Image (cartoon, coloured by chain):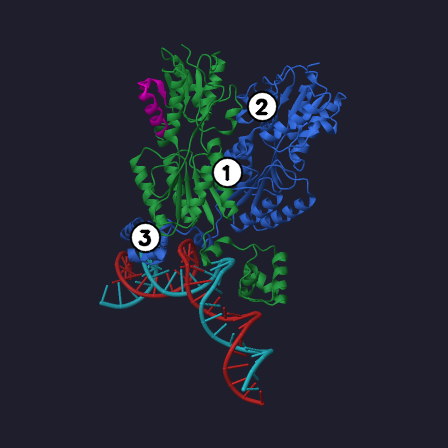
Chain colours: A blue, B green, C red, D cyan
Amino acid sequence: MATLADVARRAGVSPATASRVINGSSKPVANELRERVLRAVADLRYVPNAHAQLLARPQRSVVGIVVHDVSDPYFAEVTRGLQRVATERGRLLIICNSYRDPVRELEYVELLRGQQVAAIVLAGSGYHDAGFTTLLNEKLAAYEATGGRVAVIGRHDHSGDAVMPANATGGELIGQELLRLGHRRIGVIAGPRILTTITDRLTGLRRALAGQGVELPEERIRYADFDRDGGARATAELLATDPAPTAIVALNDSMAVGALALLRARGIRVPQDVSVLGFDDMPIAADVTPALTTVRLPLVELGVRAMTLALDPASGQPRVESLPAELVRRGSTGPAAD
Amino acid sequence: MATLADVARRAGVSPATASRVINGSSKPVANELRERVLRAVADLRYVPNAHAQLLARPQRSVVGIVVHDVSDPYFAEVTRGLQRVATERGRLLIICNSYRDPVRELEYVELLRGQQVAAIVLAGSGYHDAGFTTLLNEKLAAYEATGGRVAVIGRHDHSGDAVMPANATGGELIGQELLRLGHRRIGVIAGPRILTTITDRLTGLRRALAGQGVELPEERIRYADFDRDGGARATAELLATDPAPTAIVALNDSMAVGALALLRARGIRVPQDVSVLGFDDMPIAADVTPALTTVRLPLVELGVRAMTLALDPASGQPRVESLPAELVRRGSTGPAAD
DNA sequence: GACAGCCAGGCAAGCGCATTCCTGAGAGCG
DNA sequence: CGCTCTCAGGAATGCGCTTGCCTGGCTGTC
């Protein structure tokens, strides 16, 4: 790799001068020298060593984000928002997938810290694990103590800047809609127990139902993998309960799609025999059949806000922005069967 | 940020010793000193400055990938494969989205080069743009000249290691299936004209059809945005041609989903009135209604192979691996209407 | 008891760059 | 013509770290 010194030698100038013309320093350089340097840069295909630059002048321009899984549509959308703002502001993005593994999440925070990133955005649910939370906050605090910025999306486990989707409210909206349609036997596909997002959504749902005296017994809650197949499996289990639920609530859309697929395979009609509801309103939700009734979360906006928070100068106290949830009625829900 | 020197001072040793215990150097260090250093590291929450490390010992451990758009399901899957291998081998991944902009792609290659990444993987279609191709190859060559490794997925514009999905074969498979079902008036939703992937798929399709004397006139090919809405718009245009096509081939699944949505909105039955075919077999393809007949590309495998190629030591000559395409028949296709 | 051999740990160089400080040459003025 | 002021460009330093090399104290052997 060609170095600054190579460029300088070829141009017949000192490295200092070469550096100045390459960086457009305020210090004036004679036109002839400038051109010689530029030509040498082109000839040598010189690209500055970013590590050396960062060592010499520690300005942090990279932002790290830790998401559960970019290929999950939820995070794909959130990431799109994060990316948009980062790019607009000329920041490079390092995307790390934790695959919902708290240990890996911790490792990535450490790694990002070593990379001297300007900010870290943690996107996705927190974990019900006090030990983990303590450790995470310690690491985050150490990072912030050195000027690093942190923003989180949808998690309670960090007390700094955060943008929060209305998970509980979304749960309530679903509960109200179910009651309106006369459902009282409700099955829930809940995703991994360890995620706080799940608890939040479940709590909202429970609250709404309890208002009308409807219970959510533990046997009608299935903790499944957060994807399509997890949803299908959980649906099969719920159908095996007796009496079977008249409505199935999946706590994200991927699992709802799995539920739809299994019901179709079993010849069970949606919504005539059973209603299905999702959560998130991921892009494909309107395109499955029947189209999915779900709770819309402003996914891209979550990312946009979080990155904005992370990149704006730190304010004295933590800023928490709440983003609304909204019920989207589509074809997968109808009046209770009995 | 605490530095190595801080740690050394606190432990009462030299920076050299501290470095050695932290890196687990082969050189032995007395147990007592080792413990003192470890304690200092913990107390100070010391994390080595990755840039300084990379400067001092230029071992490149991060890999950069440039994709068109991670939130596109196609690339989400490919990225999953890339990520898997990178993680297994302990490499950090920098993901850059070019959003199908050649200029941005060039910029990212440059940036990744400056980051001293060990390898660059370019995923996604090349461009019909000779100027761009030349520039790209120049930059890539300069990068490889300094020991950088390059692998590409599904593009012809670089002569090094590559893994190629069978785009043309996939097009042929679709053509054959169409002929088998008796379709002769075929509309194509083609995605951006500038992408070589589109041309490849189109060429295969044309070849199969030409075998039976079926033509693909230019007015039945719509060059649309590569997403759902682009597919819907293009479908509306194709329906306006007279006589309307009996089958619509979308050159990726997202556009096919858009086609399905528009047809449903217009009350046109699939496959009775018109057949619809997609390309890629993205995860959701089986869950739309009717389920999408499409060409399956081993998306995750593409990523796995490419990253493997990129991380394995360079061989003398370029290695090109071809991955097969396979037709997946589902509910969206049927015999021609007339 | 003296010397060779060995090993833990420190010293210092250098990775590639930005930047401060200094030098030397030219311009301007008396 | 000589002096001072100005400014372009170069020398040198340091960012945080790794590592080759050297030192000093120890053990072992004859």
Q: Earlier in the sequence, mark 2 or mark 3?
A: 3
Q: Residue at x 47, y 21 (%)?
A: B258
Q: Which residue is mark 2?
A: A261
Q: Is residue B86 left or right of residue A324?
A: left
Mark nearest the camera among 1 and 2 is 2
Q: Quadrant of residue B28?
A: bottom right
What is the x, y in percent for residue A143?
58, 49
Question: Are the two marked residues, 2 and 3, in contact with CB atoms closer than 8 angstroms?
Answer: no
Q: Give the magenta-colored segment's residue range.
A: B200-222
Q: Nearer the viewer, residue B271 or A58?
A: B271
Mark nearest the camera among 1 and 3 is 1
Q: Disc 2: which chain?
A: A
Q: Nearer the viewer, residue A78 or B324?
A: B324
Q: Residue at x 59, y 22 (%)?
A: A260
What is the x, y in percent for residue A37?
30, 52
* Residue A312 seen in the figure: no
What type is the residue that disc 3 sits on? Answer: Val
Q: Disc 3: which chain?
A: A
What type is the residue that disc 1 sits on? Answer: Arg
Alpha-carbon neighbours of circle 3 within 10 Å: few (<14), some, or many (≥20)?
some
Q: Which residue is mark 3?
A: A29
**Is the stretch drawn in magenta largely helix, strand or loop?**
helix
Alpha-carbon neighbours of circle 1 within 10 Å: few (<14), some, or many (≥20)?
many
**How far, Cα to Cα, is label 2 from label 3?**
69 Å
Specify the quadrant that holds the C terminus of chain A: top right
